Amino acid sequence: MLLTLAMAVFLVYLVMASQFESLIHPFVILFTIPLALVGAVLALYLTGTTVNVVVFIGLIMLAGIVVNNAIVLVDLVNQLRAEGTERTEALMEAGRARLRPILMTTMTTTLGLLPMVFGIFGEGAEVRAPMAITVIGGLVVSTFLTLIVIPVVYSLIDRKRWRETPASGLTPATEPGA
């Protein structure tokens, strides 16, 4: 299961690298996965749930779910920077603009998984409860930490500057020495 989790993270990275056409921005986004692991472990500890195969399935799901919030944030930052906004201003504006969609996504996923936590529906529902606990704990903690940590990591790692070219408008350019 650990190999499957590692493969899931690697595949998520590859897809994001091709979409962002960058190796740095997907790396920034992947910082949400350790944040989610903190929340998942905390939720499992607080509920007294043991680690089993179903928990690992929840972790694999979590790796795909939590990056969504960071993708939404980093994508808007990149759009604002392409328009000529400074890095800090773009990070603050993206945080303001994407706060509500990020919170809504987290709330709908969490509320949708709550019946699974309590094992209400169907036979064997109590077997799936650890998966829901893992996803909810990881998603909630990751959401709040993502809104703080991802802008900080982005500002520390991203050294791209945007400059104007006569033919095509704004294009990325790297800093000297970066």
Image (tube, helix red, strand yellow):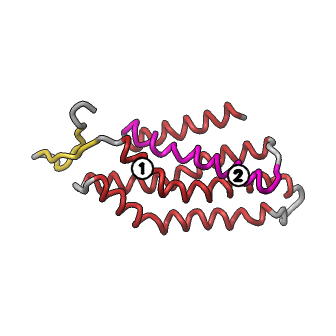
Which quadrant is home to the N terminus?
top right
Crowding near the residue tagged with mark 1, few <14, some 14–19, many ≥20 C-alpha atoms within 10 Å: some
Crowding near the residue tagged with mark 2, few <14, some 14–19, many ≥20 C-alpha atoms within 10 Å: some
Residue 34 is inside the magenta segment: yes
| Residue at x 61%, y 56% (from the top left corner) | 141
- Where does the image place residue 109, in percent across and percent down from the top left? 64, 62
- Where does the image place residue 165, in percent across and percent down from the top left? 13, 45
**Farthest residue toward the left?**
166
Q: Tell me the residue that label 1 is attached to.
A: 152
| Residue at x 72%, y 44% (from the top left corner) | 57
Which quadrant is home to the C terminus?
top left
What secondary structure is marked by label 1? helix
| Residue at x 39%, y 47% (from the top left corner) | 154
| Left or right, 62 with reference to 127 | left
- Where does the image place residue 105, in percent across and percent down from the top left? 56, 64
Amino acid at dot 2: Leu
Residue 47 is inside the magenta segment: yes
| Span shown in magenta | 22-49
Q: Tell me the residue that label 2 is attached to.
A: 42
Labelled pair 2, 1 in contact (Cβ < 8 Å): no
